[in-house]
Amino acid sequence: MTYQLSNYQLKQITKKLPPDIQAFKDKYPLSVYNVAEAWGLKPWPHGYIPEYIGIYYGDAPRGEDISFLDGKLRIFEVREPEEINVTKVSIDDEWAYIQIGKRVLLDRLGEVILPELLQEPQKILEILLAQCPS
């Protein structure tokens, strides 16, 4: 099921984004609109430590696949993404990075300090084991 853009969303895409990015809107409508939402916003400053980081795979609207809260792993979903070509990162409720295939459409990461996933290997193991059938 493809996400249907509203007239407002379509206007934002055509108003804010260059044609080469707009060209992705038919196949990846939500991701292109997410780019338009963050277009023109500055990258985060040097040394910025996010409170929340959400990583999403696919264009369909759904919850995050991986998330961190205050630097600690909160969610680590093991599932097949609907569209593996899309990776989106949200920092403190703003889109920070969106990539479709090998093309980066938005990169506002700047010099954000990202948590190291391997800082809590036991937590990752606990989350993965909880998802395995008994």
Image (spheres, rainbow, N blue to C red):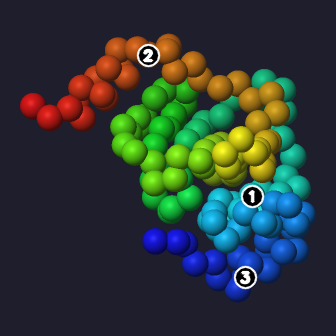
Q: Is residue 96 visible?
A: no
- Determine whether, in the image, residue 130 is placed left or right of residue 15: left
Report the mark closest to the observer, 1 or 2.
1
Return the disc, 2 or 3, that comes first in the chain's sequence: 3
Task: Tell me the tag on residue 116.
Answer: none
The residues bearing labels 1 and 2 have C-alpha atoms spaced at a distance of: 31 Å
The residues bearing labels 2 and 3 have C-alpha atoms spaced at a distance of: 42 Å
Q: Which residue is mark 3?
A: 8
- Determine whether, in the image, residue 94 is placed left or right of residue 40: left
Quadrant location, the C terminus: top left
Location of residue 3 in the rendering, given as x and y in whole percent from the top left corner: 55, 72
Badge 1 element: helix
The residues bearing labels 3 and 1 have C-alpha atoms spaced at a distance of: 14 Å
Residue at x-position 80% and y-position 38%: 44
Mark 1: which amino acid? Answer: Val
Residue at x-position 65% and y-position 26%: 114
Q: Is residue 82 above or below residue 9?
A: above
Q: Which residue is mark 1?
A: 35
Q: Quick one: 47 or 5, which is closer to the camera?
A: 5
Mark 2: which amino acid? Answer: Glu
Local crowd at mark 3 within 10 Å, few (<14), some, or many (≥20)? few
Q: Are marks 2 and 3 in contact (CB under 8 Å)?
A: no
Quarter residue 71 falls in: top right
Q: Quick one: 56 or 46, which is closer to the camera?
A: 56
Location of residue 40 in the rendering, given as x and y in whole percent from the top left corner: 88, 56
Q: Are marks 3 and 1 in contact (CB under 8 Å)?
A: no
Mark 3: which amino acid? Answer: Tyr
Location of residue 125 in the rendering, given as x and y in whole percent from the top left corner: 32, 20
Identity of the residue furthest to the left in this view = 134
Local crowd at mark 2 within 10 Å, few (<14), some, or many (≥20)? few
Q: Which residue is mark 2?
A: 120
Residue at x-position 35% and y-position 15%: 122
